[in-house]
Amino acid sequence: MFQRLIIVLSFLSIASCIDPYRISLPDGERLLTVDGYITTDFGPHRITLTRSDTYGSVFEGLIRPVSQATVAVRDSQGEVTFLTEIEPGAYETPRGFRAEVGKSYVLQITLQDGKEYTSLPELVNPVPVIDSLSYRSVQVATDSRVFDRSGVQIVASFRDPVDQTNFYYWRTVPGTFVVVANPELHTFPPNHPTNPRGPNPKDCCATCFLVDPTRINGFSLASDEDFNGLSNRLPVAFIEDNGLRFKRTYRAEIQQLGITSEAHRFLRLVEQQVSLTGSVFDQPPANIRGNMISLSNPDETVLGYFIAASVDTKQIYIENQNLQFLQTPRIIPDDCRTVQGATVDPPSNWNPPRN
């Protein structure tokens, strides 16, 4: 026993004499990222400037807004429109500003430290109108044997022009939906002195309206290489059922944008990178260069893409009774006005079709 104790003490003594090896890694490169676009709709249009550390920093993964920059849009006729910073890193055009078909636009940025950046010119191409929107209820298979995802797929109908090459980009504007609550199920709080969690129904309110606080991820792209000059019905958006959105009525808003071939190529690369499955056979993630360059340092990597596009927008109302696949409804045992952002007053342009 005494010999074992000596061996253990000797080992601890040796270990305590080993100096820790400190690895010094270079700080991650903080890349300027530009995100935003302008369209032929009236503004405001938003451009967001951020920086993030890639590795080796205590701020790794943190996105930091770039404030107090001078941001402007210049068109091909020399007219300059300055943007206003409305919150840290977010800059907006005036409400009366809109892009015009046939003109080219560049985004110009001057940071507080004097560094200058510009985009390559973006030509605004025409886009056909959306003839109609339709929807269908769909299920999405998952790895779970018990739970499947479900949601609504939105389909756009339009006719592609025969005399031009078109590149399409579809975006989903934040939707608005009816929040259905159950104030009659409200209970006293668990720390109530006489009736913890006992019934305490409220008289109001069971229904409210809410702008969807969750950004609908994903976007759709297409070129008319395979359908030039034809009428088309293409799926352009998927809105997942989270147990709240489709309890009654959901209003979706779809933007159909006509973009340049360069913007289409950039977005296609982004789409491919986002769709990586995470297997060992996937290509490693990479920074995708856009159309932004540094005038102060041509070797500097700038991320993001400034898009100038024509747009056509259309809305569609999605009704609960028309959906085949629905998730288990989420219960709100309270006044619907307790949901952040919800209001009992419908939007001024709320006009679902009457059955």
Image (cartoon, helix red, strand yellow):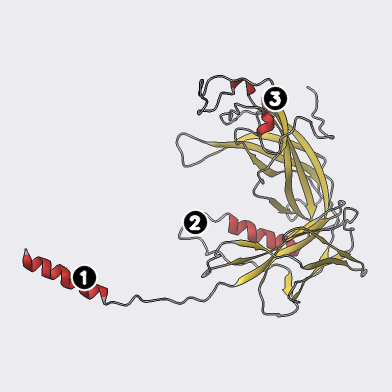
Can residue 264 be seen here?
Answer: yes
Q: Position of residue 330 (x, y in %)?
A: 58, 30
| Tag nearer the camera, 3 or 1 | 1
Image height of 170 relative to 301, above or below: above
For the residue pair 15 and 290, the one nearer the viewer reads as 15
Within the image, what quadrant is residue 78 found in?
A: bottom right
Q: Which element type, helix, strand or loop, lies under badge 1? A: helix
> Where, quadrant-wise, is the N terminus in this rendering?
bottom left
For the residue pair 240 and 155, the one nearer the viewer reads as 240
Determine the residue positioned at 52% across, 64% down. Answer: 284
Residue where numbered disc 1 is placed = 12
Residue where numbered disc 2 is placed = 278
Residue where numbered disc 3 is placed = 205
Give the Cα separation between the discs numbered 3 and 1: 68 Å
Determine the residue positioned at 56% across, 24% down. Answer: 188
Give the Cα separation between the discs numbered 1 and 2: 43 Å
For the residue pair 100 and 23, the one nearer the viewer reads as 23
**Residue type at the position of mark 2:** Gly
